């Protein structure tokens, strides 16, 4: 175990992790530099999302399309990082930052969970760019995400990077993903392919007997997304940490 992995592993269970930074509906928007600064000041870990821009830069944003957060139509992947930086998040002065900018802001102040939003069948370019940035970053980090092939890419090439496999209960009628992705992405059956160090489980799956089995074998479990203290009280015995938003964890 290298020192970088060891530090990240030690911070996996504490402190709690602020979902998309410490944002609020009336304050800093999600996945903004202001939200990450607030999380650092409060002493939390940070979860964030990354996509690849049209010019090959890792940018921090959750959705595949721009409308919800910027009011501009179109796909994020069709714009350059510079174009994305000029857009405003939820009417604030905050733009869409690059991962490089975010990591420079955070420094060694917080453990960062980098969720890779790699589209189905496109593993490689985003993973490579994220790895380049993380290797130059001094602070503790891990990569997370739903795509088991993305995890396998890291496991094969850079096994010293801490990895957490995301999963939630798939519903063919209500899933946010296309059908081909529903059947390829991170069901627990994909653990052997992904080879994660820990699991990041939705609230409706964290108490699953199979999750408990992995935890008993020494694989930590992080619950997401906890939005009120009562939810944490219900699941805390089944997991080791939480990714939260909307309250002070």
Image: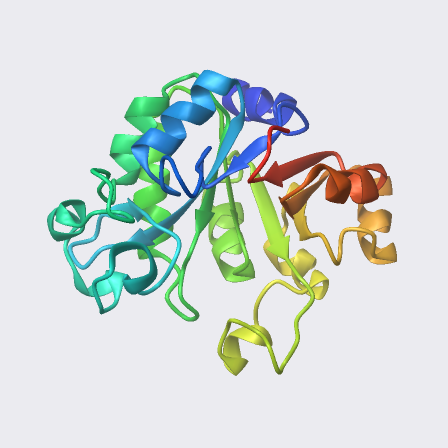
- The answer to whether 52 is drawn above or below residue 12 in the figure is below
Q: Is residue 217 visible?
A: no
Q: How many marks?
A: 0
How is the protein colored in the picture? rainbow
Report x, y in % for residue 186: 61, 62
Outermost residue toward the front?
Answer: 26
Up the image or down, 124 lies above or below 4; here it is below
User: In the picture provided, is 233 more to the left or to the right than 184?
Assistant: right
The picture places residue 52, in percent across and down from the top left corner, at 28, 54
Residue 33 screen position, x and y as percent: 31, 32
> What x and y, as percent, mark residue 165?
61, 51
Seen in the picture, residue 149 relative to 241 is either above or below; the reply is below
Name which residue lies at 30% across and 38% down.
99
Q: Residue at x 22, y 55 (%)?
A: 53
In which quadrant is the N terminus drawn? top right
Confirm whether residue 48 shows in the render: yes
Which image quadrant for residue 7?
top right
Q: Nearer the viewer, residue 116 or 131?
A: 116
Observer-nearest residue: 164 or 90?
90
Can you say whether 80 is above or below 22 in the image? below
Q: Quadrant of the C terminus?
A: top right
In this rendering, position of residue 202 left or right of residue 246? right
Q: Where on the picture, by quarter, is residue 131? A: top left
Q: Residue at x 75, y 57 (%)?
A: 205
Which residue does the image show at 22% across and 68% down from the upper left? 73
């Amino acid at each position: 175990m290298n020192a970088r992995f060891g530090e990240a592993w030690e911070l996996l269970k504490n402190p709690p992790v602020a979902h998309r930074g410490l944002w609020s509906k009336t304050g800093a928007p999600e996945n903004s530099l202001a939200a990450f600064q607030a999380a650092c000041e409060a002493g939390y870990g940070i979860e964030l999302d990354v996509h690849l821009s049209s010019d090959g830069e890792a940018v921090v944003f959750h959705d595949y399309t721009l409308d919800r957060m910027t009011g501009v139509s179109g796909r994020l992947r069709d714009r350059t990082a510079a174009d994305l930086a000029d857009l405003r998040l939820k009417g604030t002065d905050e733009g869409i930052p690059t991962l490089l900018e975010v990591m420079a802001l955070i420094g060694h102040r917080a453990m960062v969970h980098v969720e890779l939003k790699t589209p189905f069948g496109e593993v490689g370019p985003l993973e490579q760019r994220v790895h380049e940035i993380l290797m130059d970053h001094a602070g503790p980090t891990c990569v997370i995400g739903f795509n088991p092939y993305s995890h396998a890419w890291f496991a094969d090439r850079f096994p010293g990077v801490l990895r957490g496999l995301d999963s939630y209960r798939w519903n063919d009628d209500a899933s946010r993903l296309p059908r081909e992705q529903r059947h390829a992405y991170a069901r627990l059956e994909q653990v052997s392919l992904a080879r994660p160090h820990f699991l990041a489980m939705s609230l409706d799956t964290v108490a699953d007997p199979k999750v408990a089995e992995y935890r008993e074998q020494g694989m930590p479990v992080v619950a997401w997304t906890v939005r009120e203290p009562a939810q944490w009280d219900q699941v805390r015995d089944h997991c080791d940490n939480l990714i939260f938003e909307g309250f002070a964890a």
